[in-house]
Structure formats: C-alpha cells, structure tokens
Image (cartoon, rainbow, N blue to C red):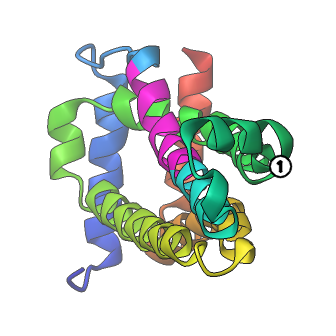
Amino acid sequence: MKNLTASDISRDLSALMEGFSSGGRLIPSPSRSFKLSAAVPFIATLLSVIGATLVYLTGYHSQAGLDGILNYFESDGWVFVLPTIVVGAFFTLLTYNKFILYFSIPKDVRENSVVLNHLKKTATKTVVFFITLMIFSTVLSAYSTWFAFSITGLLFALLMIGNLLIGLEINRLGAGVALEKIFIFLKKI
C-alpha cells in the first residue's frame, strides 16, 4: 500500500459514508453473504475429511476399501471432522455480518475505496496463507494424526488472527471511528 495521508483516509471514509446514505445503496443478498462466509469453513471441513481418510489409509492398509473408510468415520474418524464443523459454524456466524456490511456498500464506492481495497487485500492474503497451511497439514496427516487435528486449530487461528489483523489495519489507518459510525448508521436502517 502506498503511503497515505490522514486527509486521503478521511476523504475515502467520507465517500464511504456518502455511499451508505445514497439512495442507490443495495440491500445485500443474505444467501450470497452466507455462501462467502461459509466458503473457508467448507474448504477446511473438506480438508479435514481428506486428512482423516489419509490417517485411516496409512494405518489400516489391509482394510482400505470404501466400507472400511465408512466404518472408520463411524467409529474414530469423526473426531477429526466434527471439531472442524463446529469451529466452521462459529467462523461462518462471525464473518456473515462482515460480508453483509461489505456488500451493503455500493459497488462503485467499494471498488474506488482505498481503505476497503487495502482491507480486502489483507484479508485475502491471510486466508490464502492459512488455507495453504491447512493443505500442508492435510498432506502431512498421512505421517502423523496430529496434522489432521491441526486443521481445526488453523481454522480457529484464521478466525482470530484474521480479525486481529483487520482490526490492526483499521486502527493503523485511523478508520476505526468512521467505521463505527457506519455500523451505527446501518443499525438505524
């Protein structure tokens, strides 16, 4: 991100506020926001299932059929997947309102906003980093069951660290007060 001045940020936040108060603001689609907020937990759950399957296949070579895998998930394999589903549901609920807020800003304002583009880039880099770690953990779960468990931990860490990084960037840019005003304005609608 290029060096910005406080007046650049202030101008950008004023444009965001005007975008909210304009009559052209769209009401965001709840299904689109839900799908986007559930995308990362879905990927993590899928990787958790793959990791648990790799744990099974490396431990039970003689019973490596579909029936064996299904029996494994009924007895022990669910231990890897269920925590990921629970953390994923929590992740989805906590990120849903952020997508609703993001999509309630008119598209032209979103695309031209320096602050929102920077926050989007930060969030994207964080998600890509953690999904890459989850993929490595999935592959390594063939060697140790702890790697299959780590997928849930990485999803939870993504939730915490992602929110922390976005919060730090908002405060660094001095946009916290303006975004709080936007939240208050949206609650009135």
| 179 displayed left or right of 28 | right
Q: Is residue 102 visible in this depiction of the protein? A: yes
- Region of the chain picked out in magenta, as a range: 32-46
| Magenta-drawn stretch contains 39 | yes
Q: Callout 1, which amino acid?
A: Asp
- Secondary structure that dominates the magenta span: helix
Q: Could you tell me which residue is drawn at 46 percent across and 16 percent down?
A: 30
| 98 displayed left or right of 2 | right
| 106 displayed left or right of 142 | left
Q: Could you tell me which residue is drawn at 26 percent across and 58 percent down?
A: 117
* Kind of element beneath mark 1: helix
Q: Quadrant of residue 102?
A: top left
Which residue in the structure is indicated by mark 1? Answer: 76
Q: Nearer the viewer, residue 95 or 87?
A: 87
Q: Could you tell me which residue is drawn at 36 percent across and 70 percent down?
A: 125
Q: Quadrant of residue 52?
A: bottom right
Q: Position of residue 2 (x, y in %)?
A: 20, 83
Q: Could you tell me which residue is drawn at 56 percent across and 44 percent down?
A: 65
User: Is residue 120 depicted above or below 147 in this figure?
Assistant: above
Q: Nearer the viewer, residue 67 or 158?
A: 67
Q: Residue furthest front?
A: 62
